[in-house]
Image (spheres, grey):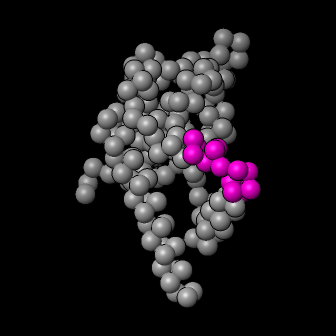
Amino acid sequence: MDRQITDQTLRALRRILRATDQGGRKLAAATGLTPSQLMVLQQIERDDALTPSAVASRLKFGQATVTNIVDRLETAGLAARQRDERDKRQVHLHLTAAGRAVLDSAPDLLQERFRDGFEDLPGWEQAMILAALERLGHLLDAENIDAAPLIDAGVIDRTID
């Protein structure tokens, strides 16, 4: 019985990983963005004039990851950095018109569908799912891995299959 449950759990995990990958590919085809890049754009839209460190904190991404993502978004003309008028050490992020257009045309993210369904669950079920996923992360030695995948930081080139 233990082996059967293990196999079913691994199969469920593979389906989740495949759904995540397919969602990322769909997003890339529609917008040219990775899921993490879109999440950063959405965060900037929600709270205009955020600092990169505030984005990192809210999304639970590493500071270096956010810096890399913002570099790419700025190069693509989707976001802009602006120095604070009073404190020149502070940099604020703003969405450009092109960034807003990309957000308007982006397909529904897997994360958004998850969030909508998850928030409809009773609190006890949310807590059980969270505990199970945290335990799974522990089993996979993933507790200290940045929430943004390496592919979004440009470490892995998805265009090479």
Q: Is residue 95 magenta?
A: no
Residue at the top extreme of this rendering: 85
In front: 153, or 15? 15
Quarter of the image for the N terminus: give it. bottom right
Give the x, y percent position of residue 58.
66, 38
Give the x, y percent position of residue 118.
61, 48
- Vertical placement of residue 129 versus 23, above or below: below
Q: Which residues are magenta?
A: 115-127
Quarter of the image for the C terminus: give it. bottom left
Q: Is residue 11 visible?
A: yes
In front: 83, or 65? 65
Q: Is residue 14 left or right of residue 114?
A: left
Q: Is residue 67 left or right of residue 57?
A: left
| Residue positioned 41% across, 55% down in the render | 19
| Residue positioned 61% across, 41% down in the render | 59
Q: Is residue 93 visible?
A: no
User: In which quadrant of the rendered view does residue 82 lie?
Assistant: top right
In front: 90, or 134? 134
| Residue positioned 46% across, 60% down in the render | 16
| Residue positioned 66% across, 33% down in the render | 54
Q: Is residue 122 magenta?
A: yes
Give the x, y percent position of residue 151.
42, 50
